[in-house]
Amino acid sequence: MIERITLARTLPAVFAGCEKDAPVCFSELWLHDVELTRGQRYLIHAESGTGKSSLCSFIYGNRRDYHGRILFDGRDTRLLDIAGWCALRRRSLALLPQEMRLFPELTVMENIMLKNSLTDFRSEHEIAQMLDELEIGAKASSKAAILSIGQQQRVAIVRALCQPFDFLLLDEPVSHLDSRNNAAAAAMIEREAAAQGAAIVATSVGNHLALTDYTLIKL
């Protein structure tokens, strides 16, 4: 279990040497000590190119091209080996990447069950109910390639929730959703996070996830 994530004067390597320039000098996160706590809600508002996707990748361990430190309960994540990262990604860290990363040749249910087979977290019936809740239950047997971008985004949301987690990282989770689908997705995400006592860390450049109570961080 991860109770807190600390960003200790973290800075993407690409920004090194530009500390006195925008966007770094206006950020409330880069080059600061910021603590993210389990059970809380965080909305990271960022302009394009300021490092929001990089932030998610840094925390999830996909990338290490940053200065400073990222700590899980005080432990530097650079000390984690592959087995450690794999364990955390199965039980503590969930990620919805901006590009969604669905397999286009697989059906909606196949895409989700591929993730669920690694965690054995939900029944197929539960997944079907979640798809119905987001109004894409009828697409369960359709290949991901033929779905609209908004439909793909909802599939990716359900897939991200098919595991236990202490921190749920959402990179622009509703960028392609209208207000009604945004509200439905937000309600599901908040319900599932609350059930696990987990934190939500969502990024956005404009269309925010409709969280009810959150800390705003400007990146």
Image: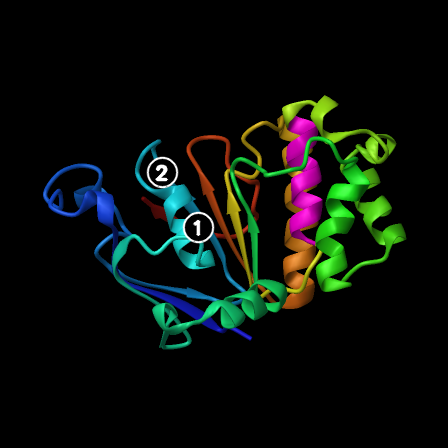
Please report the residue visible at 76 percent of the width from the left and 58 percent of the height from the top. Answer: 117
Q: Quadrant of the N terminus?
A: bottom right
The amino acid at mark 1 is Cys
Please report the residue visible at 66 percent of the width from the left and 66 percent of the height from the top. Answer: 196
Q: Is residue 160 magenta?
A: yes
Location of residue 149 in the rendering, given as x and y in whole percent from the top left corner: 63, 25
Provide the residue designation for mark 1.
56
> Please, is residue 166 above or below residue 74 in the view?
above
The local secondary structure at tag 1 comes to helix
**Which coloring applies here?**
rainbow
- Tag shown at residue 46: 2
The amino acid at mark 2 is Ala
Q: Quadrant of the C terminus?
A: top left
Locate residue 75: give its quadrant.
bottom left
Q: Residues within 10 Å of mark 1 (few under 14, many from 20)?
A: many
Q: Which of pointers 1 and 2 indicates the residue nearer the eye?
A: 1
25 horizontally vs 66: left or right: left
Range of residues picked out in magenta: 150-161
43 horizontally vs 143: left or right: left
Location of residue 13 in the rendering, given as x and y in whole percent from the top left corner: 23, 49
Query: Is 30 or 106 nearer to us in this picture?
Result: 106
